[in-house]
Amino acid sequence: MNATAKLDEYIPVVGQAIIDDLKLLAERLAQKHVLHVNSTAVGGGVAEILSRMVPLLGEMGINTKWEVIKGGDQFYQVTKKFHNVLHGRPDEVTPADFEIFMETSRKNIAEMNTDYDIVFIHDPQPIALIQKKGQNKWIWRCHIDVSKPHPIVWAFLKEFIVRYDASVFSAPSFSQQLPIRQALISPSIDPLSEKNRELSPEDVDRVLAKYQISRDKPIITQISRFDRLKDPVGVIEAFLMVRKYIDCQLILAGGTATDDPEGLQVLAEVKEKAADNPDIHILLLPQNDFEVNALQRGSDVIMQKSLKEGFGLTVSEALWKVKPVVAGNVGGIPLQIKHKYSGMLCNSVEGAAFALKQILNSPAFAKRLGENGREHIRNNFLLTRHLRDYMLLFLSLDYAEDLVYL
Ligand code: UDP
């Protein structure tokens, strides 16, 4: 991991005015103590953002801490089930699930110090901590699409949500009517992090060589947790359709997050589907941002064929690296990709295969998609914009408006 970049290092990327703006906002929050709480320190988009956001808020003088709740296997199986059914996947949720959820919540409520001016809770796993609320301000940040949630799980969560001072969703279409203030803030990537910084061609080659991948034919890559909602099997199916016509290879790479117990099972399904095809490379990645960066940069096309998605940080990461992206038309992905302008959206395996063929057959088209994508990310989805939105939200908590559009 590289040391966290300092705020002024972002000036060449986004311009002086944006950094000056951030410093002015931070001055007004200088006395505040802020606590972020989520459920995993590594793996997945939330941890990725917090690992960059927290040090920068600190540098700007806002006293910011990040805590991770503690839970066992059973708890994470339940929260994974909640996550799936909130995204609309059918599954049976039982009273025992709620009891397991509350038992772990009670332990965290007893152990965690929430004595901060602002407590910022990420996603459903730590939601019940709101029971500790005093005079301080609490924000619930929902990173997932809850537009069509499981009614019983949503009703359970809502009992907690309504006690918060504000909620944050990534996009209007993800949210629900709530009697508390809502802010709409999309996530972001850090252009200077180990995962997104520029790399030399030698760095890229070294990582590809480590995984015994040669660059003698185009590389299509999806980097994601092995999760059915990321549709890794669908990626293989699309690849196999393309492979009939174009000599190319596929990398499916991912680690497993500590709050995701299904990963190994999905990995086994993926391996079975790949059936030792020498053009399909399945990589179980260690948590290593440099390698993810190099694999993304070494690829000719990036896929993110999700069936459901929160925001889909991997899409921003790839577009920032000027890559043509083929991605599912779900969740936050259409915010990042305008079809045929800054990437290709797909709704099926056949659609994904068709988009891959178009990209592989037309290098000029592929280049244009990547370049448009990078500018779109520069203008909308970099960490500096995200910091500004969070600081405006913190300031707004001292005022009484019902609705805050940032
Ligand atoms: N990621 C990673 N290693 C992996 C798989 C994913 O570092 O093996 C990163 C990926 O680069 C991205 C984040 O984890 O930064 C995943 O965020 P996204 O919003 O795409 O999906 P989530 O996992 O949160 O559903």
Image (cartoon, grey):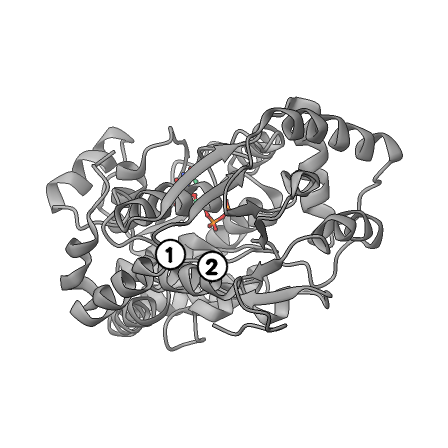
The residue mark sitting in front, 2 or 1, is 1
Q: In percent of the image, x 43 and y 54: which residue is there?
A: 313
Secondary element at tag 2: helix
Please determine whether, in this image, residue 357 is positioned above or below residue 73.
below
Q: Residue at x 49, y 33 (%)?
A: 67
Q: Distance between the residues labelled 2 and 1?
A: 8 Å
Which part of the image, by quadrant, shows the N terminus? Answer: top left
Question: Disc 2 vs disc 1: Cβ atoms closer than 8 Å?
Answer: yes
Q: Is residue 223 visible?
A: no
Q: Which sits earlier in the primary sequence, circle 2 or circle 1?
A: 1
Q: Residue tagged by mark 1?
A: 29
Q: Which amino acid does label 1 sit on?
A: Leu
Judged from this view, the residue extending furthest toward the right is 95
Q: Quadrant of residue 288?
A: top left
Q: Confirm if mark 2 falls within 8 A of ligand 1.
A: no
**Which secondary structure, mark 1?**
loop
Instruction: From the viewer's side, name the closer residue of 72 and 128.
Output: 128
Badge 2 is on which residue?
394
Locate ligand 1 by image quadrant.
Answer: top left
